[in-house]
Image (cartoon, helix red, strand yellow):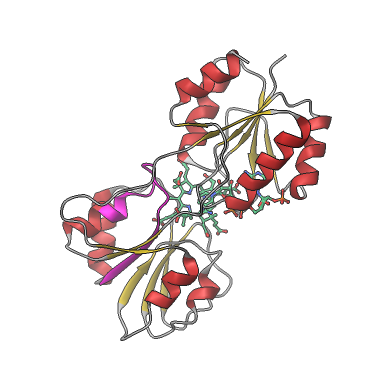
Amino acid sequence: MTNLLILGGTTEANALAKAVAEQGIAAVYSYAGRVEHPRPQPLPMRVGGFGGGEGLVEYIRENKVTHLVDATHPFAARMSGNAIEACQATQTSLAALTRPAWTPQLGDNWRHAPDITAAVEALAGDPLRVFLAVGRMHLLEFSAQPQHHYLLRLVDEPDSLPLPNAEVVVARGPFAEAEDRALLQRHDTQLVVSKNAGGSGARAKLDAARALGLPVLMIDRPVLPQRTEFSTIAQVLDWVSHP
Ligand code: 3Y8
Ligand code: NAP
């Protein structure tokens, strides 16, 4: 009896949840509980960490999970690592639903940073107006470069900010190019800092930056251990129905 656990939190995970619900496949959609109001899903949801790899092993056993689909964001490296370990320990089928990394197109002006630490170092220098579109969890690291005027886009209103010179836009994606272009022009942005999330939900800022001739500091995604990876929902559904 198929029993799916979807590790969610992305546009692709939401599309998968819709397809799984339509097919009547038994499944649970899992959120980390990072934001106040996560988007509702057409599946039973669970919110919060599992308690490390061991907690996920317990969850898999107690809930008789037969297939785990890791549809988390490419920067959710710890969750993805735990999923690989827990599925090995419990002999549970594991597949990831991933989206290819963005690649620069004609007209793009990208500089790469291998990780968030390197991106912070790359911001050394004279003050700029920076659209820091990396969310909330790593803002403290950027306080090493307080000289810039930051535009931050966060899912929830922050209690406090570790950056002295910052303005906040509270918004959750998926985002559209026209709005992002207006946002960059209104803020008079000189540099966009982005994680290489891939997918469609966050690429608007890159298209807007290209249209405005702005440079992008692109943070490459963490390298993950080998696992089965699919890029379409059809592949996932086929994998679930043909063990
Ligand atoms: C809680 C669950 C959909 C899915 C929406 C995608 C697209 C929009 C783009 C910018 C970049 C950022 C951030 C971003 C995007 C989608 C997708 C994606 C980037 C929600 C959601 C949860 C989160 C967590 C949140 C992080 C933050 C990252 C904002 C839901 C809306 C910056 C990543 O305040 C916090 O603690 C926020 C934490 C992890 C990264 C960070 O370090 O702050 N996502 N985002 C998930 C959970 O609890 O399990 O409510 O939908 C999901 C989405 N965020 O179609 O509706 O698929 O990637 N999310 C990044 O890519 O840099 C925004 O502003 O341009
Ligand atoms: P992470 O750093 O890889 O994970 C840290 C811990 O958070 C995990 O060990 C796990 O806790 C818990 N966790 C993460 N994802 C979970 C999920 N889907 N269900 C249950 N627990 C989860 O993850 P993250 O980068 O904080 O991302 C958290 C969530 O936000 C994920 O769902 C991800 O898809 C979504 N998201 C992240 C980003 C991003 O930029 N990182 C962007 C968009 C969406 P335990 O160890 O206690 O099990």
Please give left or right for residue 125 compared with residue 21 in the image.
left
Which residue ends up furthest to the front in the rendered image? Answer: 226
Please report the bounds of the magenta region as a residue range. Answer: 190-206
> For the point 31% across and 86% down, which residue is it?
126
Pinpoint residue 171: horizontal percent, then vertical percent.
Answer: 43, 55
The residue sitting at 42% across, 70% down in the picture is 119
Image point (30%, 50%), residue name:
204
Magenta stretch: residue 59 in it?
no
Image location of residue 59, percent across then percent down: 79, 36
Give the answer, above or below, for where 10 lies relative to 212: above
Residue 202 or 79: which is nearer the viewer? Answer: 79
Figure label count: 0
Q: Residue 96: image x %, image y %? A: 55, 35
Foreground of the two, 41 or 113: 113
Residues 33 and 84: in front is 84
Relative to residue 110, is residue 11 drawn left or right?
A: right
Horizontal arrangement in the rendering, residue 91 relative to residue 29 (left or right): right
Q: Quadrant of residue 5?
A: top right
The N terminus, quarter of image: top right
Q: Is residue 191 above or below residue 145?
A: above
Q: Position of residue 91 (x, y in %)?
A: 74, 28
Q: Is residue 194 part of the magenta span, yes or no? A: yes
Image point (17%, 61%), residue name: 212
The quarter in which the C terminus is drawn is top right
Q: Is residue 2 above or below residue 117?
A: above
